[in-house]
Every structure is written in C-alpha cells, then in structure tokens.
Image (tube, helix red, strand yellow):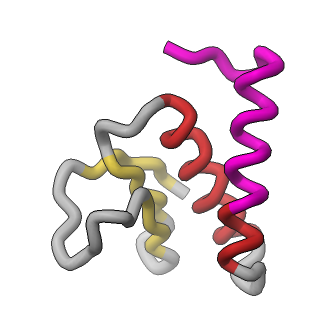
Amino acid sequence: YTLAQMHEWRDMGEDTLGETDYMAETIRIRTGLSDTSTFSTLIHEAMHVMNQTLDHDLLDSLSEQMAQFLLDNGFIKKD
C-alpha cells in the first residue's frame, strides 16, 4: 500500500480523517491533523487493510489507544 496525504476530500464529510482505496492499494490521510491524529488515523486505516471485518467503533478505539501508547512511550517521535 502507498500512503498519501490529501488536501481535498471530494464527497467526504468534515469528520473523515482518512480512507483506504483497496483497488488502488492506497491509504489517504487528511492534511493538517495533529501528530497524534495523523498517526492514529494511519493505524486505523492500516488495520482496515489487515482485517476488514473489525467493528468500526472497536477499530477507532484500538487505533487511538495504540497511537497514544506508542507516542507516550517514545516509540514514535512527535514533531
């Protein structure tokens, strides 16, 4: 999969932070997010790629917790 940042979101809502295009094998992340939100969104979309059957609410929670854990413990550096 390729990772891309998106400035414009066409038909997506204001609350959409990322999307996965399975046919193009691309994960797109909205620009202008905080480091934590960007990383959490990346984890969320990557988990979609790994397992498309996960409950979306569970996926939101797990990705936010994983991102915060990795950032808080220095595994990922903030800008």
Q: Position of residue 25 (x, y in %)?
A: 50, 67
Q: Quadrant of residue 58?
A: bottom right
- Please give left or right for residue 32 compared with residue 75 in the image: left
Q: Position of residue 53 (x, y in %)?
A: 75, 86
Q: Which contiguous range is marked in magenta?
A: 61-79
Q: Quadrant of residue 15?
A: bottom left
The one of 48 and 24 positioned closer to us in this rendering: 48
- Please give left or right for residue 41 compared with residue 9 in the image: right
**Up/down of 65 relative to 28, above or below:** above
**What residue is rendered at 17% in x and 57% in y?**
8
Q: Is residue 38 magenta?
A: no
Q: Position of residue 56 (x, y in %)?
A: 66, 77
Q: How many marks?
A: 0
- Please give left or right for residue 65 compared with residue 20 in the image: right
**What residue is rendered at 49% in x and 13% in y?**
79
Picture quarter with the N terminus: bottom right
What secondary structure do most residues of the magenta stretch adopt? helix
**Up/down of 27 relative to 50, above or below:** above
Q: Is residue 69 magenta?
A: yes
**Up/down of 73 relative to 14, above or below:** above
The one of 15 and 42 positioned closer to us in this rendering: 15
**What residue is rendered at 43% in x and 60% in y?**
18
